[in-house]
Amino acid sequence: MGGDQKGIEQGTTFVPKFDQQGLLSAVVQDCSTDRILMLAFMDREALDATVSTGVAHFHSRSRARLWKKGESSGNVLNVEEILVDCDQDALILRCRPAGPTCHTGAVSCFYRKLEGGILQPVNS
Amino acid sequence: MGGDQKGIEQGTTFVPKFDQQGLLSAVVQDCSTDRILMLAFMDREALDATVSTGVAHFHSRSRARLWKKGESSGNVLNVEEILVDCDQDALILRCRPAGPTCHTGAVSCFYRKLEGGILQPVNS
């Protein structure tokens, strides 16, 4: 392991690692319940907007633009804490959601589980 | 919204959506503590291996091959439940970890938080 890798893993400097598409993964977790609410991607612009405003922003791959979560629904995600993984290519946003996170109206986008090869509702 | 999209979001059929690289995102969450342990990617091969064995497999992007988590360390992830998100391009693996998940020896790969622009250890 080179010195750079050690610095990335053990250091205090934040050097987010974007992939070939310029993105990193961000998992949104409810900071009160620890439930995982959604997963999305951030480019540098979305990360900077999230840090500067305290409200979660992502990069919409389908619309190819900055996406403030809740920009139309009002269900924004207030970011309480940002956790960073060992190689700095994934983040956890620990948030207080203003309303249901999923566009379907569900509290979490993860409202189904795989059981016996088919999808079943999650109890919640 | 077309009928296909409605079926993907509301139906019981599992039709995982892989991206242009043939991957989807998988978040590993400890099913006892709800702590998020790691994030990685799966291709079809890794997903099938995970479902058939009950042990988490991923696709290593850096090594470009199937990666059984814990294959060298022994710290496998026993999968108790798989949750699927609305558009079926992200999964949560709710797991019982056999040991520390991170290759650094940390319980979780997310052992630091961003605070005041620098990385600080997470209390745990």
Image: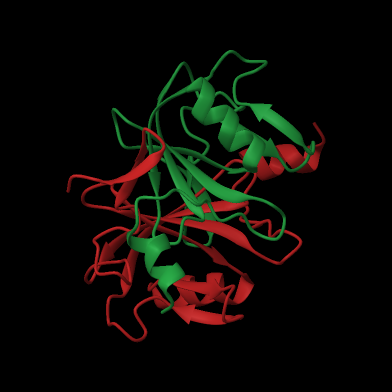
Chain colours: A red, B green
Which quarter of the rendering shows the C terminus of chain B? Answer: top left
- Can you tell which quarter of the image residue A100 is in? bottom left
Number of callouts: 0
Question: Which of A95 and A118 lies nearest the eye of the viewer?
Answer: A118
On the image, the x and y values in percent for residue A119 come to 35, 45
On the image, the x and y values in percent for residue A106 come to 25, 63
Q: Residue at x 27, y 82 (%)?
A: A74
Whether residue B101 appears in this view of the structure is no
Q: Residue at x 59, y 73 (%)?
A: A61
Q: Which residue is outermost to the right?
A: A2
Classify residue A42 as left or right of residue A30: right
Question: Which of B85 and A13 lies nearest the eye of the viewer?
Answer: B85
On the image, the x and y values in percent for residue B120 come to 48, 46
- Can you tell which quarter of the image residue B10 is in? bottom left
Q: Which residue is outermost to the top?
A: B74
Classify residue A27 as left or right of residue B117: left
On the image, the x and y values in percent for residue A56 come to 41, 71
Q: Which residue is outermost to the left?
A: A124
- Can you tell which quarter of the image residue A18 is in? bottom right
Classify residue A72 as left or right of residue A39: left
Question: Which of B80 and B15 lies nearest the eye of the viewer?
Answer: B15
Which quarter of the rendering shows the N terminus of chain B? Answer: bottom left
Query: Compared to A20, does B30 lie above or below?
Result: above
Whether residue B63 appears in this view of the structure is yes
Q: Which residue is outermost to the bottom?
A: A72
